[in-house]
Amino acid sequence: MASEIDQQRLVLIEQRLGETERAQRRIDWPLWSLRGLSGGLFSLAMLGIMLAPFTEVDLAGSVGNFVMIAAFVVLYFFYVWRFRPELFKEGRKQLLFACSVLLCAAGTKVALTFPLGDLNFEWLVPLMLFGMIYAVVFDQRFAIDATLFTLMAIVVVALRANEFHAIPIIIKLVGSLTAVLFTYNLRSRYKLAIVGLSAGAVQSVMIVAMHFSGDWHHAGGLLDLVLWVAMSLARGMVLGVCATFLLPLLERVFNITTDLRLIELLEREHPLLQMMQERAPGTYQHTRNVANFTKRAVEAIGGNALLAEVAVMFHDLGKMVRPEYFTENEPESKLLHDRLSPMMSAMIIISHVSDGILIARKHKLPQSFEDFITGHHGTATVKYFYFKAKQQAKEGETILESQFRYPGPKPQSKEAAISALADHVEATARSKFAGGLQHPDDLRNMVRETTNNKLLDGQFDECNITRAELAKVEDSLVKSLAALYHHRVKYIEDPDAKRRQEAVAMREKYKQEQAQRKEKILTQ
Ligand SMILES: [Fe+2]
Ligand SMILES: [Fe+2]
């Protein structure tokens, strides 16, 4: 009977995983249509910038320009599809990139329409600023490519206005790429001023070199050169400071979480975490373990481990509201729950999710953390109190499981799904194996059971995690748990081995007795 149920569970699990894999293979036509539409709108906006102020517009020329821009857009899509497919999922970041390109193109147009000298072009087209923003929002490698794409837009507008001068463009490119490269290992946004200043210094060297090479006809005498160098240094620093203040604004407007923000949250102990350490020390310890487990498991599938680690540190904020109702903070919490109905207890437990969301919003934590706060329980059932309610139910009374479920939503990302597994196995291991393991396979069986239960309950239906990824996650979780519990192993001894040891001991004893008897006979 048991094996029949197991068989049915297995079939259901296979069905759910198969569904995820089929969904991943399917081409998402509405999404591709939306991308096509965005590309078209971007091309039209670029054309508008090029043709402004629309005094000499000829149809053939406009169509030609549109096709040229569209070709660049297709090239960009192909580049992302070929080398950075994960960026397709980052729609908001892509929107930020598109807006930046349009801003640079518009700045170029304004600078060339109202010529106030080359300095005008330098200030109105701050490619270095965008280079730094790209490096922080995306990463250095993409930032280099994104800077080159942005430069293409600047060149296209300058060519249309018959005002293309290669030297200022080259100097701008050198400064911007230097700024991108100098963002390496950036741990605080305030260091962007130093990055800008350093890029300005490299740009100054380039300016001096170009001046003395005689190729740069725009530069005047030595006084002009000094002015250019001073402006280059000042601009680098000002743009660095601008990036420092612009980044939080862009994060808010485009609703994105940069790695820099995550590093800042991780390195400087957040006041909320300090509060948790005081109010709910057990939850704080649990949180640290879960963050560590999640980070390793997400690394194993190549996901965003930094986001997962930092977000998990804030996943149980809501437990600070009534910490004494959670076992990890108060071993006698059962006594408190005994005074309440199971329904009331479940409500208190469930409310830590909504409380967590409220606290996170009040303290302006990144919105991406909410998937972890709600997703780590998804729509799971608070089983302990559900079963307790069923036990205490009167004759004919029906207990609805839906009343004991968390409100959800289910995890929307693989990272949040992994945090749900890590959260569950950490808590289970703490209550089940505190006294030690009975068998080396205990941890693997518990992790497998947790994964299967979550799959059967449909908790991973909205996060696209695959069978292969789940296998890697399970391995990683077992390793993480083993690091905590291996020294508490209390394996049951093999009865055969014990019998063998007894037999050997008896034989040894017999041999000794024989030797003693022989000795006795010889000495008599
Ligand atoms: Fe929780
Ligand atoms: Fe938790």
Image: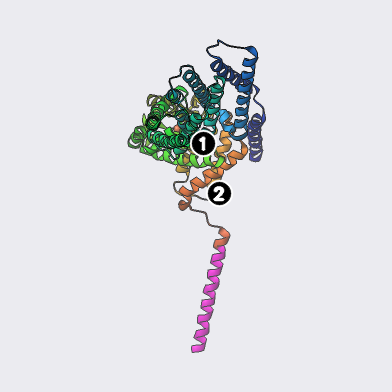
Pointer 2 residue Cβ closer than 8 Å to ligand 2: no
Is 208 drawn above or below residue 165 in the view shown? Answer: below
Image depth: mark 1 or mark 2 in front = 1
Q: Which residue is mark 1?
A: 304
* Ligand 1 picture quarter: top left
* SS state under label 2: loop
Quarter holding residue 62: top right
Mark 2 neighbour density, 10 Å: few (under 14) some (14–19) many (20 or more) = few
Quadrant placement of the N terminus: top right
Label drawn at residue 442 = none
Is 235 drawn above or below residue 66 in the view shown? Answer: below
* SS state under label 1: loop
In this rendering, would 196 be left or right of 27? left
Circle 2: residue type: Asp
Q: Residue 237: x, y in percent?
A: 38, 31
| Residue occupying image coordinates x 52% and y 81% | 515
Label drawn at residue 441 = 2
Q: Residue 238: x, y in percent?
A: 38, 29
Q: Which span is picked out in magenta? A: 499-524
Quarter holding residue 74: top right
Is 49 drawn above or below residue 482 in the view shown? Answer: above
